[in-house]
Amino acid sequence: MSNILLSADVVSFSDMLSSVGEFGIMAVLVIVLIIYFIKRDIKRDEQIIKERAATQKQIEDANKVVQEQIDNNNKLAKEREDMLIMESAKRESLIRNEAEQREKMLREESEKRENALLYNLSEMSKSVAKVGDTMSDINKNMSSMQMSMREMQLSLKNMKEEFKEMKRERYGGHN
């Protein structure tokens, strides 16, 4: 009978009355109480297992949500980082292009100034050459004028001497 009481889910009233005659009321009441507490503990254990499973599921769900949020935040951070890197690369490219354009403009301006300077130097050297040629012409003219002047002086000297001689001849030897 005790095997029946322990193994049965529901103990009927007639089973309990037949057991009372066999074992006595105290023994049956003790067995009923033990069975009651065992069943209650089994139900409580089942309920605790269910609650633990539900709690575990909630924790797993919460962990999934948190992990999804972390992954999403990491993804957003990575996208932002990639965007910032891309923007930085664009900025560097713009700065590099501007620097190259400035350098090109400075080179062109420098070339223009250099060409203007070379042109001015060329014109100045042409002017100096013209001045040199003019000076050479002036020197030649001065040289020819000096020669002419010498010739004139010689002519004058010769004329003076001829005049003196003519005077001597005319006046007889006296000055």
Image: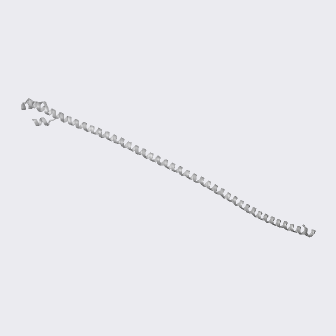
The N terminus is located in which quarter? top left
Can residue 6 be seen here? The reply is yes
Indicate the quadrant where residue 26 lies.
top left
Question: Which quadrant would residue 47 be assigned to in this image?
Answer: top left
Residue 78 image offset from top left, x and y in percent? 40, 45
Residue drawn 21% across the image and 37% down it: 46
Q: Residue 141 versus residue 3: which sits nearer the camera? A: 141
Residue drawn where x is 75% and y is 63% of the image: 139
Q: Which residue is pictured at 82% across the width and 65% down the height?
A: 153
Residue 94 is situated, as x and y percent measured from the top left of the image, at 51, 48
Locate the C terminus and report the quarter of the image it occupies. bottom right
Placement of 71 over or under 122, stated as above or below: above
Asked if residue 10 can be seen in this view, the reply is no
Estimate the x, y position of residue 82 in percent, counting from the top left.
43, 47
Q: How is the image coloured?
A: one colour
Q: In this view, does 39 lie to the left or right of 135?
A: left
Q: Residue at x 78, y 64 (%)?
A: 146
Q: Quadrant of residue 112?
A: bottom right
Q: Where is residue 77 in the image (x, y as percent from the top left)?
A: 40, 44
Q: How many marks?
A: 0
**In this view, 58 is above or below 104:** above
Q: Nearer the viewer, residue 137 or 56?
A: 137
Q: Residue furthest front?
A: 174
Q: In this image, 153 relative to 1: left or right?
A: right
